Image (tube, rainbow, N blue to C red):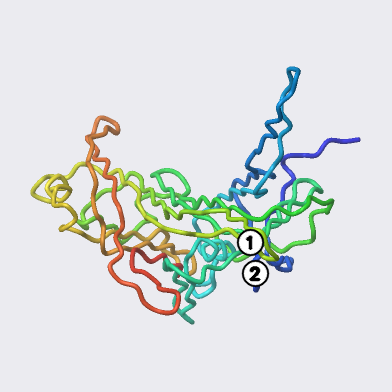
Amino acid sequence: MAGKRTRVKFIAAEIESTYGSAATIGATDVIVPIECTITPLQADVVERELVKDFYSANQQLLANLRVVVNITVEATGSGDKDTAPRYGRLFQACGLEETVNSGTSVVYKPSSDNHKSVTLHYIIDGILHQVTGARGTFTFEAEVGSIPRFVFEFTGIYNDVSAQAIPTNTPGDQASALVFKNDNVTNTNFIDSGVLFQSINIDCGNQVEYRELVGSSGKEVLITDRGVLGSVNIQLPELSQVDYFAKAKTDGTALGAFSFTHGTAEGNKVAFSSTKVDIGQPNYGDLQGIAMLELPYTLIASSASGSNTVTDEFELTFS
């Protein structure tokens, strides 16, 4: 019998209409990641601490069974400015609300209520892990000379593993990847529009909790809090241009703007923007003998609106 091949994998996702009820996975739900891993059974271990008149290990029982899936995708558009990339549904399961603006863009904003969930199908060479009720968090990573990426981590409800061949599928809604470099990045700003970026990291910072109670629908994965933070590595500017040290010590009273757009072609632009960046403790770095400045930051929300209490920490726009 031949072994199962680790390179033969399939990952698909679909938004659930009812939380925890498996969504139907179709040919157009497949996602093409650059990396995808699974913790197929994660649990809390409960020991039976029996009193015995002999030496022996205690029996271990498993509680709160869940699955963790990590999905890394290239940060690209769909190829159409008002069509979400195939992986856009993953943002919705990370607490972001999707708005499709016909003829112009698809926009994601963080929300504090009514979070959607996804069903995930992870197949490794004929072995299906169906994960329901999945919610998660994500990071964005970009460095000059590399392909920017979104890294998702989902927690979902465990379902029995079954045998299933990889189905016929239709990859799509994903444009060609672009290297993070000067020709491909515009609208750069980090409190100052003259900043020169070497790398950008953004962490959505969702607090994801698996919760299990006794009852007919007692299993759920919840997003219970969010704190968006990250870091940028920039070339050290002249103090006359911008004094990040002075801004860092203002105790949040000198909030500024943060933005960039990766990609220049219609249908393959990924833009990030925030108006309320709170800088942390600056630190020096070095790149090819040139002084760099590492700046940690937090994104602050000041208002919320709508039935899903959409907040204004940031906007993620595909156009």
Indicate which disc, 2 or 1, sits on the residue closer to the N terminus: 2
In this rendering, the answer to whether 101 lies above or below 28 is below
Image quarter hosting the N terminus: top right
Are there few (<14), some (14-19), or many (20+) residues within 10 Å of tag 2? many
Q: Which residue does the image show at 29% across and 33% down from the upper left? A: 287
The mark lying in front, picked from 2 and 1, is 1
Instruction: Report x, y in % for residue 141.
Output: 43, 48
Q: Looking at this view, is 208 or 186 the one in front?
A: 208
Q: Looking at this view, is 306 or 59 the one in front?
A: 59
Q: Amino acid at mark 2?
A: Glu
In this rendering, the answer to whether 40 lies above or below 271 is above
Circles 2 and 1 in contact, beta carbons < 8 Å: yes
Q: Quadrant of residue 226?
A: bottom left
Q: Looking at this view, is 265 or 136 the one in front?
A: 136
Instruction: Report x, y in % for residue 318.
Output: 46, 67
Q: Which residue does the image show at 35% across and 64% down from the upper left? A: 314
Q: Which mark, residue 16?
A: 2
Q: Which mark, residue 133?
A: 1
Image quarter hosting the C terminus: bottom left
Q: Label 2 to label 1, Cα distance in Å?
A: 8 Å
Instruction: Report x, y in % for residue 115.
Output: 52, 68
